[in-house]
Amino acid sequence: AQSVTQLDSQVPVFEEAPVELRCNYSSSVSVYLFWYVQYPNQGLQLLLKYLSGSTLVKGINGFEAEFNKSQTSFHLRKPSVHISDTAEYFCAVKIVQTSYDKVIFGPGTSLSVIP
Amino acid sequence: DTAVSQTPKYLVTQMGNDKSIKCEQNLGHDTMYWYKQDSKKFLKIMFSYNNKELIINETVPNRFSPKSPDKAHLNLHINSLELGDSAVYFCASSHKRGWGDTQYFGPGTRLTVL
């Protein structure tokens, strides 16, 4: 079975500082990897995703993530955060199989940007 | 234009009542989903439909019944509401089943059972 771990439930960081949100997954088969962001009182929206190819993936709002197969990780990074980045961030995995449709979300990391 | 819309946004009701949440997507997607997000923000899939066909049915009480009249709509009906049903329910859609497609989420329906 697949699972997703986000070790940090809360990450406070000062404005303009860099941030890394950690994500590790467990799967015996190939997976697609996603990061979604949920702003307060809103639905989730995609930040970036890894399907194949280059392991460094760039997303919206200056975020990027690196897929590391040997460490089964997909950590999210931003070199300089803004107040508007305060939100809940979810890492997710989906099996690479055409008949399989289930996305498994991690428990989320709450990013708080301090002015 | 809103891509994935849900109604109502808020729903407050008494235990034992029956309620419905509606979801519509105008993206032309084939696949739609219902998720439940609990008070700790944990997000779990409940159902998934592909072209009106149920393809994922997680361990959800049978008081929850999804209905897809066409591939643009996926409604959720809940019978005999219980306190533990209080949560935010999200509808989502994606282009094709089984690929690395982005899921597009609605704004959520906050259900409070008193």
Image: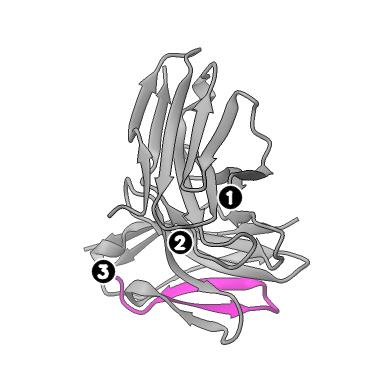
- The span from disc 1 to disc 2 (Cα, nearest Å) is 25 Å
Label 1: state its secondary structure. loop
Q: CA distance from mark 1 to mark 3?
A: 40 Å
Numbered circle sitting on residue B51 = 1
Which residue does the image show at 58% across and 50% down from the upper left?
Answer: B51
Amino acid marked by disc 3: His
Q: Quadrant of the C terminus of chain B?
A: top left
Inspect the magenta stretch and tell me whether residue A65 lies in it: yes
Indicate which disc residue A36 carries: 2
Write down the chain letter for disc 2. A
Q: Nearer the viewer, residue A106 or A18?
A: A106
Q: Which residue is mark 3?
A: A82
- Vertical arrangement, residue A83 with respect to residue B8, above or below: below
Viewer-side label of 1, 2: 1
Depth check: B87 or B46 in front?
Answer: B46
> Can you say whether B56 is above or below B59 in the image?
below
